[in-house]
Image (cartoon, grey):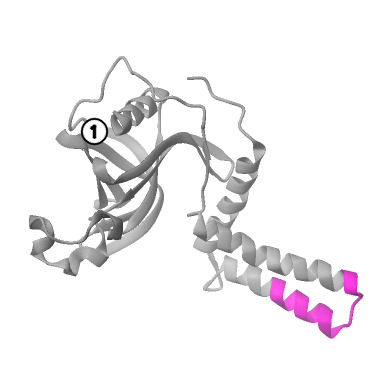
Amino acid sequence: MTEPNLPTKSSWRGRLYGFAFVTDLSRWLGIRRSVWFRTTAVLLFLLSLLLRLPLAVNLLVGGGMVGAWLIYWLAQRAGYVAFEVLHTAVAPEPTTTLRQEEKVSVRATGLFSVMARERYLLQKKADYWHYPLGEHAIMVEEAPGRYLYQFISAKRISHVKAGYLYLGEQRFPGLEIKYHTDWAPELVNEGSSYYVGGGLPDENLPHRTIYLTFHSHADWQRVWQTFVQ
């Protein structure tokens, strides 16, 4: 499959979201830079009102203030990444099929868990593999020597779409995976009955979206084929 010429909107969104992520992550004088940016936008708007500047100026400064807050809200809602789906793509038939429990090195973005703890991770090193009967496993390196996980049952997958993930100025071949999970902190207190056939129906399980990106075109195709076979 050749790379398409994708719309530039995802590239621009990726840059804006990447900027939001960096400023949300970094601090100045002990305060997140994103807070400085948004607070400055509010103060400039209030100052323009106090100085009784022309209406056009007030509207311009007010629009900048709303825009600054909106960018961070949209970025956080999207997980700081933009994903462009390849709507015309057809799942491949690779010459080399991914064997059961064969690990593939990937990058993972989304919510990952261990016991009662969950954390959003962005483009972290991970391993993907699959088991018989369509069970998929992802182990993500949260920090050196520390890992979070997600286990996905094929029957609980809403969709798997191929495309490109944008983060900042970079573009990565990837998969968007939406599913219901039984591996989440809010299910820890469901009791042992959940694991022996009781528990919540699938539609009441937490809904998740994760992204996997790949180091090679071949790995992208093989994992994609494994999810949809």
Q: Residue at x 55, y 57 (%)?
A: 75
Given residues 92 and 165, the one toward you in this image is 92
Magenta segment's dominant SS is helix
Q: Residue at x 62, y 52 (%)?
A: 16
Given residues 180 and 70, the one toward you in this image is 180
Q: Which residue is mark 1?
A: 103
Residue 199 place in picture, x, y as percent: 16, 61
* Residue type at the position of mark 1: Lys
Q: Residue at x 35, y 55 (%)?
A: 207
134 sits left or right of 10 in the view: left
Q: Is residue 65 magenta-colored? A: no
146 sits left or right of 75 in the view: left
Residue 41 place in picture, x, y as percent: 71, 71
92 sits left or right of 202 in the view: right
Determine if residue 208 is in view. yes
Quadrant in which the C terminus is drawn:
top left
Which range is magenta?
41-56
30 sits left or right of 185 in the view: right
Mark 1 closeness class: few <14, some 14–19, many ≥20 residues within 10 Å = some
Q: Secondary structure at mark 1?
A: loop
Q: Is residue 157 above or below residue 1?
A: below
